[in-house]
Amino acid sequence: MTDQTRNDRDRSPHFVNKEPWDPYVAERLTADQERYYMAGQWKLMWWRFRRHRPAVVSAIFLALIYLSTVISEFIAPYDLHTRHSAYIFAPPQQVHFFHEGEFIGPFVYALKTTRDMQTLQRIYTPDTTKPQKLRFFCLGDPYEFWYLVDGRFHFVCPPEGGQFFWLGTDRLGRDMFSRIVYAARISLTIGIFGIALSFALALVLGGLAGYYGGWVDNVVQRITEIIKSFPHLPLWLALSAALPVTWSPLLVYFGITIILALLDWPGLGRAVRSKLLSLREEDYASAAQMMGAKPGRIIARHLLPGFMSHLIASATLSIPSMILAETALSFLGLGLRAPITSWGVLLNEATDINVVAVNWWLMFPVVPVILVILAYQFMGDGMRDAADPYG
Amino acid sequence: MLQFVVRRVLLMVPTLFVISALVYFIIDLPPGDCVTAQVDELLARGDPDAMRRADELRQLYNLNDPLWLRYLDWVSGIFRWDFGLSCQDTVPVSSLIGERLALTIVMEAATIVFIWTVSFVIGVYAATHQYKLGDYVASFIGFVGLAVPNFLLALVLLYIGKVYFGLSIGGLMDPEYIDQPMSWGKARSILEHLVIPVIVIGMSGTAGMIRRLRANLLDELQKQYVVTGRAKGLPPLRLLIKYPLRHAINPFVADIGGLLPDVISGSVIVSVVLSLPTTGPMLLGALKTQDVNLAATFLLFVATLTVIGMLISDLALAALDPRIRFGATSEK
């Protein structure tokens, strides 16, 4: 007790501010800065991604085109398989707005068919006296929406008593535009499914190799080396030639997806492995191990989130090569088969250059392929930059 | 160095063995064999001898043997330059592939040289003239090269050539030289016809290489030793070649190993589109008719080419960089 009082007496009087203490008094954060400092990792990435203009535009474009695959039946004016035997190899019909200087809304001129008696080829000429108005939000070709619901409702239909081949027709008189719209469904999803499968393979195999090391690592490393040192296209060809002809088109679709993924995972798997190798030495990994966490939990819960964003970015960058591979295989006639239609299957019709030289519109499926690949390239670049928002 | 070379060469052997077995197995995988289609055709024509003929053919191609026996037969023959019989026309595979292999090697070597020289020149120019017009043009070409798949490029070029210039750029020599012995005229004709396929196949590879060389060189150009050299008054060209370029060239050489599979993949599909007399179209046909010996030989050849190319790039890298020659090699 006496000690206590003496201490109190010895202590020099000093001033204590009664007001609450503000740690930011030296450097006041602006509202913006505060928002930035408090933001989570994914939010930061989103902000970084938004700054990359081409990537944002590409992402919007891709979102729209993927949305269109959900409602292909509605967008396409015709069915995938509707044949117009009177309009074989009809050229694209231009959409006009003014007829003889008078505005009458979007319309096409009727096609007049004559036959060249020398070559016996049909010649189509627009009949400029007969404007035919396009119909919008209308009833047209019947379809089964997602093979579930019957419907006839289309965004745009051919005019009454006329036809509307915006991108021409092929050798069976099928509308190219409708076919491209339907084919997007297959071409675009095969990239997504393929990359999902390849991603899973890479996570499991790369994860095993990176976490366990030793002989597991050795085996996985040798496999990836062999796959990487072999040109992919010939191997893809061999594998897809091995798919039995008796398989249904749907099975072939899944078969091709699996084949694409089988040769694609080593790149991602390598990234997973090298990241895991360095991360498993971190203190928090050892801590988790000592607390008795199982390897699966440590990998999935503690290590993977550390580089998931990088993985997603590099996976996005390899989607275009998947889409291209499918296009190439189908183009060569070893990929998907009719009635399943992808852009590659459509391009398969353009293999004979003599046919294409006369009917140039058969090359149209090239355009969406290139656009989608460019968009993925830009978006992937943006995502890769954004994947490390602290850099 | 010798030890390094020997070890790399020895590593090639098991890799090729695994690939050959895998490839042979995969091609044989689908039900039926190459005789099935031929017999179906005979049956359709109502040939009464069809079944007997099928048995004869199967006997001839040893198709009744188990797979592993046929594989061993084929593999052991390779060392005698005997690849078995092609199922299509009952001729030895070795007589079918000779010229095609040679032309393939010529085409792929030309493509690699093209990619190398073009991307080297453009890459260095783009890096030293950053944000100038030339740099933007190079980047633009790079993007087009990456985005336009090469078989579509080939298709478009074929179309343009046909419609606007009335020439067919298919084939790899003028028609009069086909099946002729090698001569100066033939060699010239081949070289002329090589230009388009080489550009088409090399396009995407060139684009990637330009991007990487530019990035590497830009990193080096910002370092202090370059500033020091410039301050000392070294002539710009000498400064560039003597110091930063040497650093930037290393990954460039290492990339060739990764480039080769792409080039070979590209050459297969482009030669199908342009109908070049290389391995591509014949491989495709053999795969479609399940001609196991022929297809497997082509695939093995393609794999060998890749592995040898990788070896060359590794050796070049080792010659360039003493750290690789003396240090731990495989792990990075």
Image (cartoon, rainbow, N blue to C red):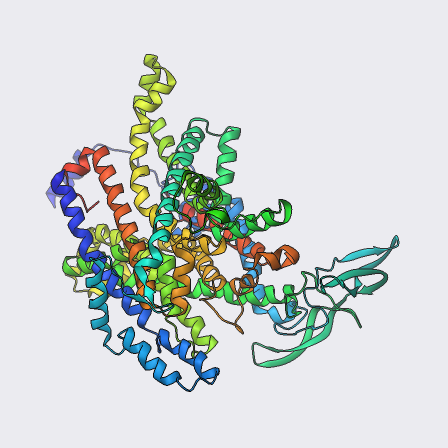
Residue B255: tell me if it is visible.
Answer: yes
Give how far across and how far down residue A117 sits, in percent: 76, 64
**Considering depth in this image, is B107 or B41 the residue closer to the camera?**
B41
Q: In the image, is B123 to the left or to the right of A82?
A: left
- Residue A97 in the image: state x and y as whole percent: 80, 56
Quarter of the figure with residue A284: bottom left
- Asked whether the viewer can see residue A27, the reply is no
Asked if residue A225 is positioned above or below residue A37 in the image, the reply reads: below
Placement of the C terminus of chain B among the 4 image quadrants: top left
Q: Count the marks: how many? A: 0
x then y, percent, for residue A290: 15, 60
Identify the image quadrant of residue A217. Answer: bottom left
Q: Which residue occupies 68% across, 68% down?
A: A88
Residue in the picture at 26% in, 57% down: A226
Going by the image, does A24 lie left or right of B13? right
The image quarter in which residue B319 lies = top left
Q: Residue at x 55, y 61 (%)?
A: A347
Q: Which residue is the extreme one toward the bottom?
A: B48
Q: Nearer the viewer, residue A377 or A239?
A: A239
Q: Is residue A299 left or right of residue A382?
A: left
Quadrant position of the N terminus of chain B in the picture: top left
Query: Please, which residue is most extreme toward the top here?
Result: B233
| Up-down relation of residue A389 to residue A80 (above or below) | above
In the rendering, at what x and y percent does residue B99 appear? 36, 51
